[in-house]
Amino acid sequence: MTTELKNEAMENNESVLNTEDVNESVPEATEESVDTTEKAVDEVTEEKDESDGSIFAEAVEKMPKKYIPLRVGQKIKGTVTHIAEDGVSVSIGSKRDGFIPNADLSLDPDYQSVKDAMKIGDTIDVMTLSTEKQVLLSAKKIAEIRLADAQVDEIKEGAEFSVQVQRAVKGGLISKLGSFIVFVPASQIRNGFVKNLDQYVDKKLRLVALDVDLSKKKIVGSQKELMNREKKAKEDYFWNNIEVGEIVEGRVLRFAPFGAFVNVRGYDCLAHLSDLSWLPIKEPSEVLELQKTYNFLVLKLDREANRVSIGYKQLQKHPWELAAEKFQVGTVCEGKVARLTTYGAFIELDKGIDGLLHISNVSWDWISDLGKILTVGETISVQVMEFDAENKRITLSRKATIEQPVIAQEVEGEQAEATAENEHKVATSDDGEAKMVASSSDEPDVEVAEESK
């Protein structure tokens, strides 16, 4: 009978204990609880004249009110019993005192000043770190929790907070902030689908709260919301501080068949292929290099479509501006025969700059077939005769760089003599006006009309 009563009492005792909140802050002794319970039951069973019901009631009344086994992470209120060089001993109602190492005394790294302010008998809140060979405690952990809990009011108002992910569960990530459980749904980690949640374990996340439940001590957080907020803030700043015609600095991010994407103040802008060079190009890499920084001109802004057009060539000198400086009239230079026509040849002086070599300026000799003198791709010397920057025309001469042959000089002399022979005779008319009379003789005669008497 006595044995059965003991068993029943112990079963009821365990039942009561299971309903207690294990997170309560003040646990009692653990190792003495069983002995005390058995003594209480023995004392009651010795009273023979009591009924079974009153025996059980007295046994329960004399049992310890709480029986909370020590466990890691448990919050306990203790009393300082000894202050040593390496830490502080604390009575926690157990057969063994707990011990707080210096590093776990406070958030303040100056643990000596913390110990100097302590005295025997002080009450201190601690958390259990270990229950094995020695009961290790931490007051620092309690301070961290209280500090984190103090953020909750600001977090409810939208303040940013950070947590370290403890584990991944189905549908999201779990962490802790002080005494609050923080849950980050998979859809709130970032924009887009996250396939592998385990990659975030032990990683630090910056969050804002979507919901805070104070009664359940739960926070639903979102990293995606924070990222979107920051992105919008950057975009607003960008659009409010940029204008068409402004020169901006940008870093080339990537190439596309139609142009280059450039990061300008944290925003992706497009430099179209046609705005990269004054000359025809097939791809952006002919002008720009990836990850290199250049100056660009803002050409167009479209906030509604979130598009910014920028140009590179607009900040570079036009090839004809450079040609005007390089190929002045009288300059002798080399050029490559680009193509032949019936009236002359086009000579490439520089990239995108061609000049016209007229057939009459190719040679001192008469030419019937230009292809017998010049070949496409051949490099020749020419002299700049005319430069028309407005109409983008350059007139060249090859024969001006060649010494004039002796025969050609004689021919020119004969032509000059023939011109002199064909000069007109000058006659004076009756009214005193001069007349031009053609003469066929070697030396032209000049007839002067007699004055009328």
Image (cartoon, rainbow, N blue to C red):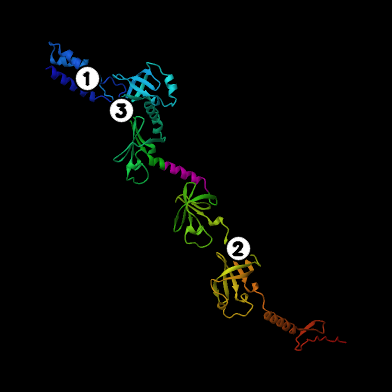
Query: Mark 2 or mark 3, which has the lower sequence index?
Result: 3
Q: Is 194 in front, or is 439?
A: 194
The x, y position of residue 284, in whole percent, is 48, 58
The x, y position of residue 129, in whole percent, is 33, 27
Residue 118 is drawn in which quadrant? top left
Q: Is residue 296 magenta?
A: no
Query: Mark 3 or mark 1, which has the lower sequence index?
Result: 1
How crowded pointer 3 is (Cα within 10 Å; few <14, some 14-19, many 20+) is rated as: some
Under mark 3, the amino acid is Val
How crowded pointer 1 is (Cα within 10 Å; few <14, some 14-19, many 20+) is rated as: some
Residue at figure coordinates x 64%, y 77% from the top left: 364
- Vertically, is 179 above or below 5? below
Q: CA distance from mark 3 to mark 1?
A: 21 Å
Which element type, helix, strand or loop, lies under badge 2?
Answer: helix
Which of the labelled discs sits on residue 34, or is there none? 1
Residue 432 is drawn in which quadrant? bottom right
Which element type, helix, strand or loop, lies under badge 3?
Answer: loop
Quadrant showing the C terminus:
bottom right
**Residue to which mark 3 is pinned:** 72
Q: Is residue 241 magenta?
A: yes
Mark closer to the observer (2, 3): 3
Residue at figure coordinates x 52%, y 59% from the top left: 277
Is 195 placed left or right of 38 in the picture? right
- Vertically, is 12 above or below 253? above
Please report the bounds of the magenta region as a residue range: 228-242
- Vertically, is 422 above or below 34? below
Query: Mark 1 or mark 2, which has the lower sequence index?
Result: 1
Under mark 1, the amino acid is Val
**Residue to which mark 2 is pinned:** 323
Which of the labelled discs sits on residue 180, or is there none? none
